[in-house]
Amino acid sequence: MTFLERQPSGIPVPRPSMRAAPYWEGCKSHVLRYQRCDDCGYIGPRPFVVCGRCGASDISWKTSAGEGSLYSWTVVWRPQHPSFVVPYAPAVVAMDEGYWMMSAVVGCDVEDLRPGMRLAVEFRSVSDEVTLPYFRPV
Amino acid sequence: MTVHPFHDVAIVGVHNTVQAKKLPDHDAESIALQGAIGALADAGVAASEVDGVVGQFSSEVIVELALGARTRRPNMLGIPALVDAAALITTGQCSVVLVAAGGASLYTDRASTAPWTRPANEFVAGYGLFTAAEFALMARRHMIEHGTTPHQLATVAATIRNNGHANPEAVHFGRGPFTPEDVLESRMVADPFHLLDCAMTSEGGCGIVLASADRATDCDAPVWLLGTGSDCLGPSYTFAPAWDFRPRSDEEPAGRVGWRASRRAFATAGLGPGDVDVAELYDPFSFEIIRQLEVFGFCGAGQGGPFVEEGHISPGGRIPVTTDGGTMSFSHAGIAAQQLQRVIRGVEQLRGTCRTNQVEGAEVALCSNGGSGALFTDVLLIGKDRP
């Protein structure tokens, strides 16, 4: 079977950090959030409290349109942990707002993965606290 | 040229313990201690002369060897631990420094990948990422941008695995020989990496002794520090490993991590890639060799794939790479030992004592640690002659 599915419950669940709480709360209500500097527009690779580019501390959580393109991916056949069903396709998504996001592609065949293919976010609850954003071709 | 203080530091002792799939009588600390003792014996330096210990078990080594009150620098990395040791010497804090590391009894849950390959950050845990997948995300971009092929990756893996196949001290001694086709036919782990494109796991320890020039000249075969550099773009495995991640527009992207480190190392040494006789490159995954050859300047950007297919990294080639079999075949005990072992092999090459794949007349070795998927690369240039 080479169709990429979302993972079943029972996989290792992220432990949300305090700094990233707005991100995980957004995911629970199916809203994808990212941080952006109010002064210069910088978007960091991870949650931040001071802008690494201009030094401003006015950082806002923004809502992403949830769309992007496939920047890079892998197809995993030897799972990191036995709770993961293979194959699965961790991916870096180039979001339309101008940042890279770590996720996984679902809803297509392994053979259909192409650089630059258009993707849209799709949420799945994996525990009471955590909902994971995946990406599906559009 | 101004003399760099590190040019007054030499590596005077190196030792690898026995390396094996399992060392049932050892834990990480005990095998690291064996590495430390072996390195002192190799150097012909008494434990009482050691005035500093650096590395994974620095405190433990101090008490186990009954050294007394000594300078300690914990450092879980490889080359950076050696640089810490060199700095202790050049600043007059120490004259003989011992560095040791080891791994054993760490990988017990065989249903999962090795514990050090799956750190549990909130942004990667739910997607089943581990080191092979993180590094694959970098390799894929190179394949997209430059047309690098699975066969080129497999050529690297076959070359390094054949180096280990020939090396009686390698955990995978006698497992080959391998062709690129053998690599391509092994089961897929994280596309484009087949099983044989990946580091294996094993157990073992090692040690290195560094000394000031005054002390080193009394030792049999000092090998000298020529230059070093270290690049890190942030914590490994906590955010998307995008090749083009570039926090500063005037610097190279994350996929070329190590460009700054290697240039600093070469500048300090007053050398260039053409002066290197052997490259003991860190080989967590086959693609990383192709990447490092480009980043360090052994070939042009995007040319690493054809470069390895032309045979340049094989024994007898233009720049023999990872001549003991590396983490794919020699040993990969986790944490720091396998990183220090790149330097140990470099030292053995410059001493001319390698039992297999000795590069005749080798005078300069480049050793590296890290990789793009982990967002860091450390570089150390060492030489047979005092600069």
Image: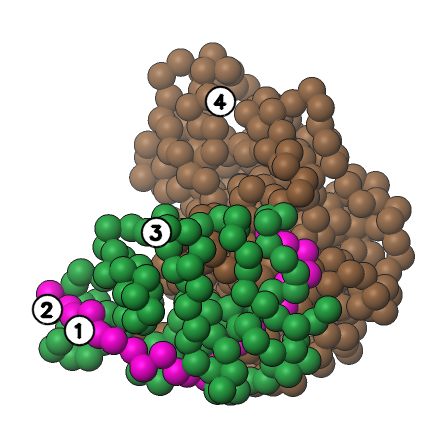
Chain colours: A green, B brown
Q: Which residue is mark 2?
A: A58
Height in image: B143 above or below B96?
A: below
Q: Which residue is mark 3?
A: A129
Check if mark 4 and mark 1 are on a common chain: no
The image quarter containing residue A36 is bottom left
Tell me, yes or no, if residue A58 can be seen here. yes
Three-letter code for the amino acid on which mark 4 is drawn = Val
The residues tagged by marks 2 and 3 sit, at their Cα atoms, a distance apart of 28 Å
> Would residue A77 be found to the left or right of residue B134 on screen?
right
Residue at 41% in and 68% down: A123
Q: Dot 1: what SS?
A: strand
Residue numbers of the magenta segment: A55-80
Residue at 22% in and 74% down: A62
Task: Look at the numbered discs 2 and 4 and tell me whether their residues touch, using CB distance below 8 Å.
Answer: no
How far across and down, in percent of the image, does residue B230 sit? 42, 57
Q: Which of pointers 4 and 3 indicates the residue nearer the eye? A: 3
Q: Which mark is residue B61?
A: 4
Height in image: A102 above or below B110?
A: below
The residues tagged by marks 4 and 3 sit, at their Cα atoms, a distance apart of 44 Å
Pointer 1 chain: A
Task: Look at the numbered discs 1 and 2 and tell me whether their residues touch, using CB distance below 8 Å.
Answer: yes
